[in-house]
Amino acid sequence: MRTAPTTTESPIHFWSPPDLPGLEFDPFLSRMLHEEPVSRIRLPNGAGHAWLVTRHADVRLVSADPRFSRRAVLGRDVTRVAPHFIPMDGATAFADPPDHTRMRRVVAGAFTARSMRRLRDRAQQVLDGLLDEMERHGSPADLVAHVARPFPQAMVSELMGVPARDRESMAHWTDGILSAAAGRTASERAKAALADRFAALIGAARRAPAARLPHQVPADGDARREQLVDVLADGVEAGTIGFDEAVGLAVLIQIGGTHAVRNNSANMVYALLTHPHQLARLRAEPALVPRAVDELLRYIPHRNAVGLARIALEDVEVGGVTIPAGDAVYVSYLSANRDPEVFADPERLDLDRDDAASHLAFAHGPHYCPGATLARLESEVLLATLWDRFPGLRLAVPEDELRWQRGVLIRGPEELPVRW
């Protein structure tokens, strides 16, 4: 076993993630994957250094091994991309098993097979309505404004039980939380506002458990509610989850379900429009949609840099390097998805590949994305419907004229002008 490098043996790489255009892969991540797969880094905010783990097998190890703790991050000023932490202190993102398992079990009540069937039907209805509006607007149109933004916003609101009057405010607060350029004060203010609103919604659900809409009562007569604010309220009443934990969970799922899915929806359409042979393959065989979603999730670099760190609770060997107890560790799901040891010709978008389902776009281990089922559902409905409605869909401007968001943690286009 190779011993842990000392500060004189191993360099600490300063990594300030650039605002990259399109789906360009971060060259620093690519270099670390191929040249120094377990390396030390320093990011623009926070203190000290952290380890960066880039290979698929090593990422799976760190993200599933209980010797690496998310809870231990709390109270530490670890080096990081954003000036602030994205999750609330009581959220599952900062929890380890068994507390994490307990909280995730409560959330599962909103992701039953029945609720997903209902949400798939609702997703098709919502998307059809949005495409109707886009058609009435006429060509050209901005796909972000007409589809990629309102579609996941509507669907996560359906899942959460967010009233229509609150949806725009919640989308605005989410944008503020996920902007690295907004500054710590503005981002923390947005997070507090979002948390306050969910606290009010969960509190109202606790006070009036019987006052629910007819569509919230399953047809088989089971009185268990399925919208997430109701599920969380029931968990609080049962003593399974604390009120602050419930609010933290709601905030985390709202953020992922609104902002991440919005950008990834636009990224998926952009990827297909700029890979016409792959688009033609998908249109020729609609049954390919689920596999196409996996490959797009693998291929698209959906975020800048890395997410939340973990802390090594003891010395752990990773990829032949000993990471000392107490050190912060980041995993890169993006680089894991480009690991040539797992994915043949990983730089190529290929809807026919057999290995796409091994991607880690939704993370791995206990912190696997709780909203992955809904995100996948939305992507499948979008890709199965969009070109049926608009078979001539294409970019309305040259590719190099597209504007991409800057200073954000989740990547995506500001606008996606299309013609049909």
Image (spheres, rainbow, N blue to C red):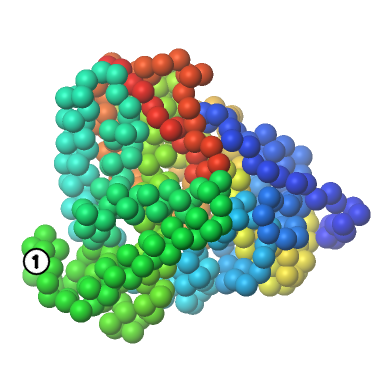
**Residue 371 seen in render:** no
Percent position of residue 296, x then y: 44, 35
Is 195 located above or below residue 10 in the figure? below
Q: Is residue 266 above or below residue 52?
A: above
According to the picture, the residue beneath numbered tag 1 turns out to be 220
Number of numbered callouts drawn: 1
- Which picture quadrant has residue 288? top left
Apparent side of residue 44 relative to residue 117 in the rendered image (left or right)? right
**Which residue sits furthest bottom?**
239
Left or right of residue 335: residue 376: left
Relative height, residue 306 to residue 325 (above, below): above
Camera-side residue: 344 or 247? 247
- Residue 370: give x, y in percent of width and height: 40, 59
Residue 139: image quadrant is top left
Q: Residue at x 46, y 36 (%)?
A: 412
Q: Is residue 23 left or right of residue 244?
A: right
Work out which quarter of the rendered image holds the C terminus and state it: top left
Q: Which residue is at 26% across, 49% downward?
A: 155
Residue found at x 12% / y 72%: 211
Image x and y of residue 58, in percent: 65, 53
Asked if residue 286 is positioned above or below residue 163 in the image, the reply reads: above
The residue that appears at 44% across and 72% down in the rendered structure is 101
Query: Quick check: can you spot residue 162?
Result: yes
Residue 92: horizontal and vertical position, in percent? 46, 68
Q: Amino acid at mark 1?
A: Asp
Q: Is residue 293 left or right of residue 151?
A: right
Neighbor class of circle 1 (other Cα within 10 Å; few <14, some 14-19, many 20+) is few
Residue closest to the eye, 253 or 278:
253
Mark 1 lies on a secondary structure that is loop
Q: Quadrant of residue 337?
A: top right
